[in-house]
Structures are given as C-alpha cells and as structure tokens.
Image (cartoon, rainbow, N blue to C red):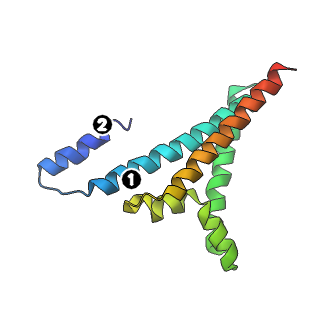
C-alpha cells in the first residue's frame, strides 16, 4: 500500500514541485518504525490468545491505550513527568523529529528496543505454551 506513494513525489517534482527528500525519507522511516511496533504488539497478543479475534481486539485495545497515554503529558502539571513522558510518546517522536527530517538515534533505539522486547516476550509466551 505504501509502495506507490513515492511515485506521487516524483510526479509532483516533474510538474515543478520541490521536496526536501531528507524529510520525506525520515517520514517514511518513522512510519516503518511505528508499523514495526504495532506489528510486534499484534504478534505478542496473538501468542497470548487462542482466538484470532481476541488477539486482534487485545492488540487494538493496547494500541488505543498507547495512543491515549501519549496524549496525557499535555494535561500533566509536573515538568519532570512531562519530560519523561515525552521520551516515550510515539506521536511526539514522529511529530517533533522524524516529520521535520531529524533522525535522532535515541528515537531509533527506542523503537528498535521496544520491538525487540515485544518479540522476546512473544517468543517466551510461545515457549511457555509449548511446555504446557
């Protein structure tokens, strides 16, 4: 689904538009990392449930909770809590750095470690199920 979208930029550039390709590439990188995180959540929930429908619902609930947790820092009064929460806010990471073309390695490490942790938990869940 995302494969033909770069063609839009190329066609627009042919007709005279100019793009900062670094910002475009960073935006795509951010989408890939968020997609990987959401897929890892889905894989973990599918190992925790026998039913595909229940695992889908569980993954959706976790992702909705994750979304609303990222909106909470704007309502908090403590600057320390806001600072800590801003480091874990997926949408703030996307909006503040990757959408502006800034690829910060700490954000990439955050996404990579979150995906690795979720996949590790999924592997352990499968091993526990196998030994039952």
Q: Residues within 10 Å of mark 1 (few under 14, many from 20)?
A: many
Q: Looking at the figure, which quarter contains the C terminus? A: top right
- Position in image of residue 108 (x %, y %): 52, 52
| Quadrant of res 20 | bottom left
Q: At 20% from the left edge and 45% from the top edge, which residue is drawn?
A: 10
- Between 60 and 20, the residue placed more toward the observer is 20
Residue 23 against residue 48 in the figure, above or below: below
Q: Secondary structure at mark 1?
A: helix
Residue at image coords 17%, 44%? 11
Q: Is residue 67 visible?
A: yes
Quadrant location of the N terminus in the rendered image? top left
Q: Which is in the foreground here, disc 2 or disc 1? A: 1
Q: Is residue 4 left or right of residue 83?
A: left
N-terminal label among 2 and 1: 2
Determine crowd level at label 2: few under 14, some 14-19, many 20+ residues with C-alpha closer than 10 A. Answer: few
Q: Position of residue 21 (x, y in %)?
A: 27, 53
Residue 112 locus on image (x, y percent): 57, 45
Choose between 1 and 93: the one closer to the eye: 93
Q: Is residue 49 visible?
A: no
Image quadrant where residue 48 sits: top right
Numbered-mark total: 2
Identify residue for label 2: 4
- Which residue is the site of mark 1? 26
**Where in the figure is residue 5, as x and y percent of width and height?**
31, 41
């Amino acid at each position: 689904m995302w494969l033909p979208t770069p063609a839009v930029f190329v066609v627009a550039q042919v007709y005279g538009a100019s793009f900062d390709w670094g910002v475009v590439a960073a935006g795509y990188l951010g989408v890939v990392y968020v997609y990987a995180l959401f897929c890892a959540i889905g894989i973990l929930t599918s190992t925790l449930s026998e039913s595909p429908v229940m695992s889908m619902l569980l993954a959706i609930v976790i992702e909705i909770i994750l979304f609303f947790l990222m909106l909470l820092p704007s309502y908090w009064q403590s600057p320390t809590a806001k600072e800590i929460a801003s480091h874990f806010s997926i949408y703030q990471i996307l909006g503040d750095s990757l959408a502006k073309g800034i690829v910060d390695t700490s954000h990439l490490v955050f996404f990579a470690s979150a995906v690795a942790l979720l996949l590790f938990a999924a592997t352990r869940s499968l091993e526990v199920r196998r030994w039952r």
